[in-house]
Image (tube, rainbow, N blue to C red):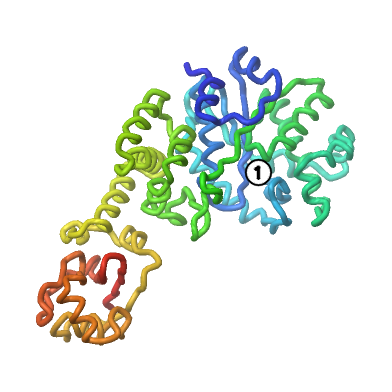
């Protein structure tokens, strides 16, 4: 069985450790938890670090608890935030919790005996906890000075911090106390920005029960170029394929820099140290083949989506970058087609206009309303120069339009030059 600490250290996944945490894990099977914030009905790749920590914890023989914050989601964590966020209703939270739970079940084993993973929702123990009882039974154990010393509070004092957000660390601290008392949970894990909140929990356990509990945090991931990990021009990279298609998901990893890929493959895959070192050696001998990025993208896309979705994503990539891929593009499904070409100009034409077109020049200028070529002369010159294709088939003859098989019975993919694509929808 893998040693959790040794595994985490060589993967670069440890930031802070409370004294005694390593001894606790070596002493007995330990229950540990990480909190997930249900502000959306899907997790994104920023959450993957914490998911992988729980995966390694379980593989090391310990018991992972995934806490979804049905109650804390109604409050809002100020850690790392510059402004207060909108609070969510219980109905939205319940919907989000169901989505998050389904995703966590893809990674953790919830039926493996003694160290089976468990999902807990802090709304279950907060819903009947009235305010007066909370401030009397819990609040009296933590001083204002202690709470004010936390970076998550200090950083917001000038811009303004509501009492709701100020109380967050006490609420999260009580989560740890509740799990300690009811689930024998002795360890909380989280990102380094959560250190203050986690330590408040260990302090509550000490003061309320004379107990001992521990904390471990992971580094916040930064990209080598300084931009934020997990973000694209379109926003978060989600685990839900309705929000981020498997193709876009795969492309995020494939487009990683070499430095980032060496970091990510340690954090986000289950490959062994030897496998990763061998891969890095191969990669360094032929960086243009992007072996690291491909291994990374294939591993994560398979685990988050499926081998079938990975194959579709790779297939779509090959079609996009191949000079000629007529047969393949005819077989691509609509969702993948639209995902691959998301953001390119879409042009609507009618079926009768297409059927009444006698040559490609008319189609690419007049019928498509001048959006591809503004004049027939420009279209003619580029076709004669070999720079235009439809459905990945180069147009050789300016005088006769072939009969094109519509992709998914309604699309034509026009390529003008090397990089300009247009998707024509035939209605």
Q: Which is nearer the eye, 394 or 418?
A: 418
Give the secondary structure at mark 1: loop
Q: Residues within 10 Å of mark 1 (few under 14, many from 20)?
A: many
For the C terminus, the quadrant is bottom left
Looking at the image, residue 92 sits to the left or right of residue 83; the answer is: left
Query: Looking at the rendering, which quadrant does residue 332 occupy?
Result: bottom left
x 25%, y 52%: residue: 318
Which residue matches tag 1?
A: 69
Is residue 339 visible to us here? yes
Query: Looking at the rendering, which quadrant does residue 404 occupy?
Result: bottom left
Q: Is residue 42 above or below residue 320?
A: above
Q: Residue 222, how many percent across, how many down? A: 56, 43
x 29%, y 53%: residue: 317
Q: Residue 60, how many percent across, how many down? A: 51, 21
Q: Residue 22, how many percent across, how many down? A: 63, 18
Looking at the image, residue 23 sits to the left or right of residue 250; the answer is: right
Q: Residue 366, how many percent across, how many down? A: 25, 87
Looking at the image, residue 423 sits to the left or right of residue 103; the answer is: left
Is residue 352 visible to us here? no
């Amino acid at each position: 069985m893998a040693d959790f600490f040794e595994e985490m250290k060589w993967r670069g996944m440890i930031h802070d450790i409370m004294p005694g945490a390593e001894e606790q894990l070596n002493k007995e099977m330990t229950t540990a938890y990480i909190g997930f914030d249900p502000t959306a009905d899907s997790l994104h790749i920023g959450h993957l670090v914490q998911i992988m920590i729980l995966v390694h914890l379980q593989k090391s023989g310990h018991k992972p608890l995934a806490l979804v914050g049905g109650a804390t989601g109604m409050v809002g964590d100020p850690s790392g935030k510059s402004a207060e966020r909108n609070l969510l209703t219980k109905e939205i939270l319940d919907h989000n919790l169901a989505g998050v739970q389904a995703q966590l079940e893809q990674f953790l084993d919830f039926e493996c005996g003694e160290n089976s993973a468990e999902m807990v929702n802090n709304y279950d123990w907060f819903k009947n906890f009235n305010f007066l009882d909370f401030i009397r039974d819990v609040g009296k154990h933590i001083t204002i000075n202690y709470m004010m010393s936390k970076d998550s509070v200090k950083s917001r004092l000038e811009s303004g911090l509501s009492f709701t957000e100020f109380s967050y660390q006490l609420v999260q601290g009580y989560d740890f106390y509740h799990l300690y008392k009811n689930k024998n949970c002795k360890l909380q894990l989280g990102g380094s920005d959560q250190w203050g909140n986690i330590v408040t929990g260990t302090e509550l356990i000490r003061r309320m029960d004379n107990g001992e509990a521990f904390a471990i945090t992971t580094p916040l991931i930064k990209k080598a170029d300084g931009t934020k990990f997990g973000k694209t021009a379109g926003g978060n990279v989600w685990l839900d394929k309705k929000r981020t298609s498997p193709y876009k998901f795969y492309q995020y990893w494939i487009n990683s820099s070499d430095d980032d890929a060496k970091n990510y493959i340690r954090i986000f895959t289950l490959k062994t140290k030897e496998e990763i070192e061998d891969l890095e050696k191969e990669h360094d001998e032929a960086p243009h083949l992007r072996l690291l990025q491909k291994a990374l993208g294939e591993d994560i896309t398979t685990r988050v989506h499926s081998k079938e979705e990975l194959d579709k994503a790779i297939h779509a990539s090959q079609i996009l970058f191949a000079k000629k891929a007529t047969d393949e593009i005819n077989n691509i499904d609509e969702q993948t087609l639209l995902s691959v070409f998301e953001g390119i100009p879409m042009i609507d034409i009618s079926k009768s206009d297409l059927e009444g077109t006698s040559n490609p020049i008319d189609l690419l200028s007049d019928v498509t309303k001048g959006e591809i070529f503004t004049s027939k002369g420009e279209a003619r010159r580029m076709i004669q120069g070999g720079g235009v294709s439809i459905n990945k088939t180069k147009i050789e003859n300016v005088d006769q339009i072939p009969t094109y098989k519509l992709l998914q019975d309604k699309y034509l993919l026009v390529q003008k030059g090397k990089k300009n694509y247009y998707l024509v929808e035939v209605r």
